[in-house]
Image: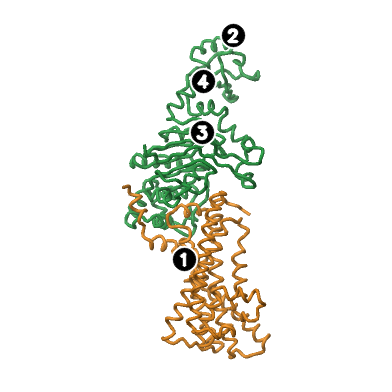
Chain colours: A orange, B green
Amino acid sequence: MSEALEHSDAPSRLGPWLAAARLGWAIESNWADPFVFMTYQIVRPLFGALILVVMFKIVTGQPTSSAVFGQMYVGNAFFILVVQCVSCIGLVIFDDRERYQMLRYIYLAPIGLGAYLAARGMARLAATTVSILFTLAVGAWLFGLRYHLSPADLPYFSLILILGGIATLAMGIMLGGSTMLMAQNGWSMPEGVSGVLYLFCGAVFSIDILPWPFSAVARLIPWTYWLEGIRRSLLGSGYVASLAGLTNAQILLRLGIGTAGTVAVAWLTLRFAEYRAVATGKLDEKTDH
Amino acid sequence: MNWAIETQNLRRVFRGGTVRRLWRRKSAQNGNGETVALDAVDLQVKPGELFGLLGPNGAGKTTLLKILSTLLLPTSGTATVDGIDVAKDPERVRKRINMVSGGEHSGFGILTVRETIWMFAQFYGVPGRVVRERADRMMDILGLTEFAETKVSKLSTGTRQKMNIIRGFVSAPRILYLDEPTLGLDVAVAREVRSFVRAWVDEHPERSIILTTHYMAEADSLCDRVAIIDRGRVRACDTPANLKRDWAPECVYRIEIPLWTQGGHPLDDLDVVRSADVEHHGDRGRTNLRVILENGDGIGAVTERLSQRGVAALSVSRLEPTLEDAFLNLVGHGLAASEEKGR
């Protein structure tokens, strides 16, 4: 058997994936320099949170010590992960195809496009974790938020975070896959989708205030249960009145089902987009528009 | 025989807007606005062969490579790589191939040369120790060692292309596609790349390379066999020597005469002359004629006609036929002419 086949017929699963994650980290963390990167990772989400605080005080007239404020603040802090990961993975195809002109070589490599996109998203996920932790710390320091995460809640909280992370990566892969069939000017689509999710998953406003078709969508998507689980773990109570009757286990189950559904749809979307891109010759076609 | 590559009746048609951007050759379009990029392509490439696809821009070379590398599906017909159907089992095909394209400014600028090579080797599952050995050796051969820790964004076009060459070779693929690998490179770098490619094939006799080029000399000097492709069809496929013998049987002479200022050339009404190219060198007071004759006996008639017109033949030399002569006979025009039409 040839040398190449010895390598590639049984490649290490982790090696290619780590290499792609490392590339993602290099791109995410070196867009300027580490100092500027950290400033960007901290200042931007922090000021996003501060804008929310000002809006909350003006609109509701309530103090930041109110329970609603804590729910909004935590939901907004964690939603940064969805925005960052979905936008990041959603732009990988455009960047690799148009800017770096490397998409065809990545596609031809045995790593597989799905694993590559997930690895690139993981790098952003790691970077965004810093933003979330800092925003939460500021919430405690400036606005007196108290987090009640006990060691007993830790396994539940970890499961919630992992499932939400998987769902978010899957959504990114779904959007990233579909951009294979788009010209470069579709770059804003992933950001648009994360904006829609922001409204539908109750990051700031409870899904109970949404009109019927939208509230039904909100109950189907995993991020609604993800944020509810996070709030229950960190703040000791949920945010959405209509979900109050669900136990923590039921929230976890719904999140699991929603995540599995998102992963399945993402896989199908990616496979379909790959097929269409290869059938039409768009996979490595630089659009320049 | 187990072919490295085999295509049967391969056809690819582009439709709609994509056609306009990719394929500007109106002559290849049919009445439905479709462009037939490949038509009835039958090819076999042996294991260990350095196989050339020679043709002008828009001939279908890159389309063929894209199909063979699973980047594009054929409209009809079949293509197998190492015995595996590219349309039915592309994942298995990808484990056996790699690709390098020329004329592009590709690369992740944030990574260094070594990081780029390492990353792609990882994608192919090549162990770290093997990567280091291969990368160091290849960088040494291509004169890239001093740039190993340089970020890709800082590299010149030629150096970047050398890195991409190594990226393609480092996984030691069974079949490697080189799509115009020397396009846009200066003469010295192009020569280094050609030597590297030839040496690699000689060192790895069981592996195959498919090289597309529109440089005649590159195909002639590098390839074991060459397929001449034009407007989506394979016009001939053989060794460069056989192509020249079979498709360029005429006698070609270079004749130097004093500067000819009367328009046309002094042999324009001679039956034995099939064609003649004229080059004037006013600074030297000379005109060079490149004359293709029906057969070797015609040279007597040529010198006689020059003598009748009072033109002294300052020098007469017989030229060996080139791949370009074969191409010209097969396709009916030279590469430059077809590229002009393509614009």
Labelled pair 1, 2 in contact (Cβ < 8 Å): no
Give the label, 1 or 3, closer to the camera.
Answer: 3
- Determine whether, in the image, residue B139 is placed left or right of residue A47: left
- Say few, some or many: other residues with alpha carbon within 10 Å of mark 1 (under 14 / 14 to 19 / 20 or more): many
Q: Which mark is residue B301?
A: none
From the image, tell me which residue sits under label 2: B308
Q: Does the image show residue B182? A: no
Give the label, 1 or 2, closer to the camera.
Answer: 1
Mark sitting earlier along the chain (4/3): 3
Above/below status of A120 relative to B173: below
Instruction: Out of B144 and A196, give the one closest to the viewer.
Output: A196
Q: Amino acid at mark 3?
A: Val
Q: CA distance from mark 1 to mark 4?
A: 62 Å
* Relative image position of residue B322 (x, y in whole percent): 48, 27
Q: Secondary structure at mark 3?
A: strand
Give the label, 2 or 3, closer to the camera.
Answer: 3
Q: Which mark is residue B234?
A: 3
Mark sitting earlier along the chain (4/2): 4
From the image, tell me which residue sits under label 4: B254
- Say few, some or many: other residues with alpha carbon within 10 Å of mark 3 (under 14 / 14 to 19 / 20 or more): many
Q: CA distance from mark 4 to mark 2?
A: 19 Å
